Amino acid sequence: MAFGSLLPPAPAERRGIPLYYDKSEDETRRDVYERYDELVARQTALHLADEINDGYPFQPLVDYMRTWLPHREQLAVADLGCSVGRLIGDAASEHPSWDCYGLDFSYQMLRQARDYWVLGETVSANLLRFGYTHDSFSGKRLPNLHFALADAATLPFPDGSLDLILNTFLIDRIPDPLAAFQEWKRVLRPGGRLICVSPLNFLKREQWETYHPPIKLIDPLVRAGWQLADLTDPLFLEEPMDRRGNVVRWRTLAMVADRV
Ligand SMILES: C[S@@+](CC[C@H](N)C(=O)[O-])C[C@H]1O[C@@H](n2cnc3c(N)ncnc32)[C@H](O)[C@@H]1O
């Protein structure tokens, strides 16, 4: 199958990015991840700026994922909530025969991602205000990677079409994680795998009540038929904040679950 062919024709498109969700102006205004100078800059500093970070700050996350990646020549993979596309970009780059997709709800994140990973442009973000010495990073041209705007809980993929779903720092940002897991089950083929890493840093009191401690999230998944291949808690990750070396330390839960 041709790269990108799992995405059906989109109802709309903006500058090469298919839009599977009709995001209103109000939703866009309220979405912090659409703020280029704040959140897109932060994600660029974290994920695309290895040269100013002395390596990739989330390397322990990559190492964890590598342990659990299926070893297959052909694979259809999606990263949900991919932001500027680092994880799926690295996967597409290391595995040129894989059919790779990065989906996010933020057009600005996706634009940065596509410019960098697909169009091979030099992208910039205002990082000088964090003390860094430069703020532009030259991209790649990966033919096996496609980005699209969609809600992670309503995906454009056909039933049973994906072999692997990744998502990191996403499930505490979506309103109904269990409904999203249902949707991920729909698009995974039987035997397909989900790798999910999250600090479970929920934003709403009701979500803390429903999903903390994490067993309250894991139990329903097992009951819904997911087979847990791994549960690692905690997996600590550090996100750099500035040139001085201040960091945010995330206590994440990492999980590998197979669709039976
Ligand atoms: C905290 S950032 C994490 C980004 C990246 N995966 C990482 O590990 O750093 C959350 C990302 O999820 C996206 N997001 C939030 N809600 C979403 C949803 N319902 N569907 C798809 N993406 C979503 C945001 O736009 C943002 O890019």
Image (tube, rainbow, N blue to C red):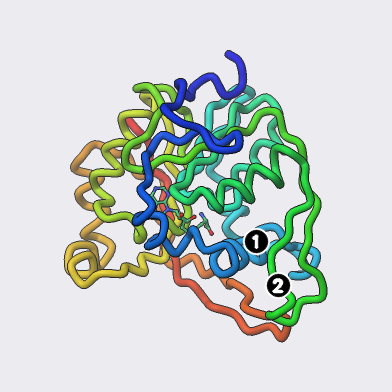
Percent x, y for residue 53?
A: 74, 70
Left or right: 221, with 229 as reference point:
left
Distance between mark 1 and mark 2 Cα atoms: 9 Å
Percent x, y for residue 46?
A: 64, 65
Percent x, y for residue 224?
A: 21, 39
Q: Is residue 68 above or below residue 46?
A: above
Taking the image in four quarters, ligand 1 sits in the one at: bottom left
Q: Residues within 10 Å of mark 1 (few under 14, many from 20)?
A: many
Name the residue type under label 2: Leu
Residue drawn at x 38%, y 45% as measured from the top left: 23
Q: Quadrant of residue 146?
A: top right
Residue drawn at x 80%, y 64% as measured from the top left: 51
Q: Is mark 1 within 8 Å of ligand 1?
A: no
Residue drawn at x 41%, y 27% as measured from the top left: 11
Disc 2: which residue: 127
Q: Residues within 10 Å of mark 2 (few under 14, many from 20)?
A: many
| In the foreground, 16 or 80 | 16
Name the residue type under label 1: Thr
Most extreme residue toward the top is 1
Q: Quadrant of residue 74?
A: top right
Percent x, y for residue 212?
A: 24, 67
The label on residue 44 is: 1
Q: Is residue 226 above or below residue 65?
A: above
Q: Quadrant of residue 171?
A: bottom left
Q: Is residue 235 above or below residue 249?
A: above
| Quarter of the figure that contains the N terminus | top right
Question: Which secondary structure, mark 1?
Answer: helix
| Quarter of the figure that contains the C terminus | top left
Residue drawn at x 62%, y 78% as measured from the top left: 241
Q: Are marks 1 and 2 in contact (CB under 8 Å)?
A: yes
